[in-house]
Image: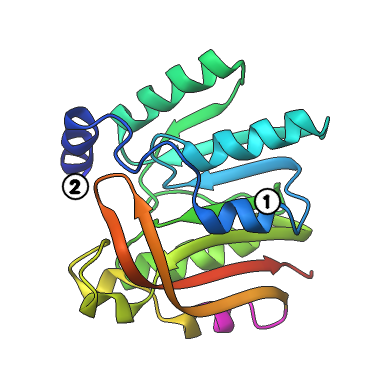
Amino acid sequence: MNQHWDNLYSQTQDLYGISPNHFIQHIADQVPVVGKTLAIAEGEGRNILYLADKAKQQNDSFSAEIWDYSKVALQHLSAKAQQAGFDFTLRNIDLNDVEWPREHYQNVMCVYGHFDENTQFNVLTGIRQALTNNGWFIGELYSKEQIDYQTGGPKDINYLYDPMSFLSVFKNDHLYHFYVGEQERHEGKLHNGKCHVVQFAIQVKK
């Protein structure tokens, strides 16, 4: 699978465009995405670069760790971060094998990081474990309804998300924003048109 992603990123620079996801832009104006931040399945870094630049402009404390399956994507991200003057920690990692730390990050972000259902559950529970009290989990993902839209994302419905998974794992936390429904997305070569998403900004309460 990592060879598949390495090939895609090798063939197309900025596979998902250079602009950050619209929801990430919106929610970053609503909640304080500051401090130690983990971005998973972040690819070439369009969203984490945006958050880092926003924090820099506001003189906020911010550090970033990025996990991705593709070495090529991380190489592209490393070059962009260096050019922008950011010192990120980059890890080429398979989320099936990761050992999640406890109460380590103030924020975790996942934008269109899609995995099989077992991995989804492990990732969601791992994220909750890794967040500090009052930490934020933010992101946008394709719901299972996306299978009928054919405008981006996995072709296997098992890699799309059931909103109830979030409500189960984060049932004791503060759902500042939780939306399931249609959006219009135009992001690089692979996300184009009306789609069905799960958006979330969840503040963990421990």
> Does residue 94 appear left or right of residue 126 in this picture?
left
Magenta span includes 171:
yes
> Does residue 47 appear left or right of residue 44 in this picture?
right
- Amino acid carrying label 2: it is Met
Q: Which residue does the numbered mark 1 point to in the structure image?
A: 107
Magenta span includes 133:
no
User: Residues under labels 2 and 1: Cα distance?
Assistant: 27 Å
At x 49% / y 29%, what residue is drawn?
90
Q: Which residue does the numbered mark 2 point to in the structure image?
A: 1
Q: Earlier in the sequence, mark 2 or mark 1?
A: 2
Magenta span of residues? 166-172
Residue 88, percent across and down?
58, 26
For discs 2 and 1, the disc positioned in front in the rendered view = 1
At x 40% / y 57%, what residue is drawn?
112
- Amino acid carrying label 1: it is Asn
Label 1 sits on a secondary structure element that is strand
Residue 27, percent across and down?
66, 58
